[in-house]
Each structure stands twice: as C-alpha cells, then as structure tokens.
Image: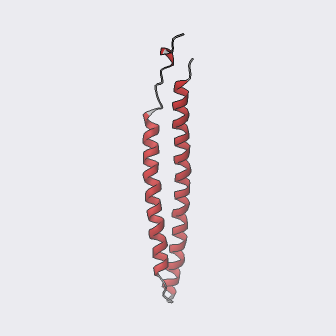
Amino acid sequence: MSFAACAPSGPPPELDIVVRELTAIVERLGELTTIARALSGETDWQARAARIFHERADRWAGDVSSLQCASETARLEARRARDSAALAAWACP
C-alpha cells in the first residue's frame, strides 16, 4: 500500500494570514479598551461636561471591548477552519 497519494498539502496560506491579522486586531483592541477605561477613570470632575464625557467614555470602552470579543471569536473560527483544512489535507481519497 502506497501512502504517497496521502501527502498533505496543508491549509490554504490565506487562513494563516487571517489568523495573524485577527490576532493583531484583538491585541490592539485590548490596548484601546485599556485606554478607553483610563479616560473614563481620569475624569472625576463634577462639571456637567465632565460627567457627560465620563459617561460617553464608559460607553466607548464597552463598545471597544465588545469589538474585541467579536474579533476573538472570529480569530478562533479562523483557527478552527485552518486546523480543519490541515486535517482534511491528510485524508486519503
């Protein structure tokens, strides 16, 4: 029995690129979440404008955090697709 026909071709290289770029996005969104939360925390003034800024900074921090979660989910799905493609490449016809 010859296994030469079962040589893996590997997952499409585009999936590696997608995973790498999503990793960078997740990391950057994590940094932005920290910055957004710091902005909110640094506004402890009592002026009306400061309170409004504080509320908006909190909302923005939540939005950025949500984007980070969505990006992380996309990254995990891309990894799963890459790994599935890699496993499929080992399957013999």
Number of numbered labels in the structure image: 0
Position above or below: 32 against 39: above
Q: Between residues 91 and 28, which one lies in front from this camera angle?
A: 91
Residue that appears at 55% across and 70% down: 59
Q: Position of residue 7 (x, y in %)?
A: 47, 20
Q: Is residue 25 above or below residue 52?
A: above
Residue drawn 52% across the image and 74% down it: 56
Quadrant of the drawing holding the C terminus: top right
Looking at the image, what colour scheme do you see? Answer: secondary structure
Residue 74, how many percent across, how many down?
54, 48
Q: Residue furthest top?
A: 1
92 vs 3, nearest the viewer? 3
The picture quadrant where one finds residue 62 is bottom right
Give me the residue at 46% from left, 44% from top. 19
Q: Quadrant of the N terminus?
A: top right
What residue occupies the far front of the structure in this picture? 1
Could you tell me residue 32's position as x and y percent?
Answer: 45, 64
Task: Identify whether 69 is placed above or below 54.
Answer: above
> In the image, is 59 to the left or to the right of 15?
right
Give whichever of 46, 42 is nearer the camera.
Answer: 42
Q: Residue at x 43, y 47 (%)?
A: 21
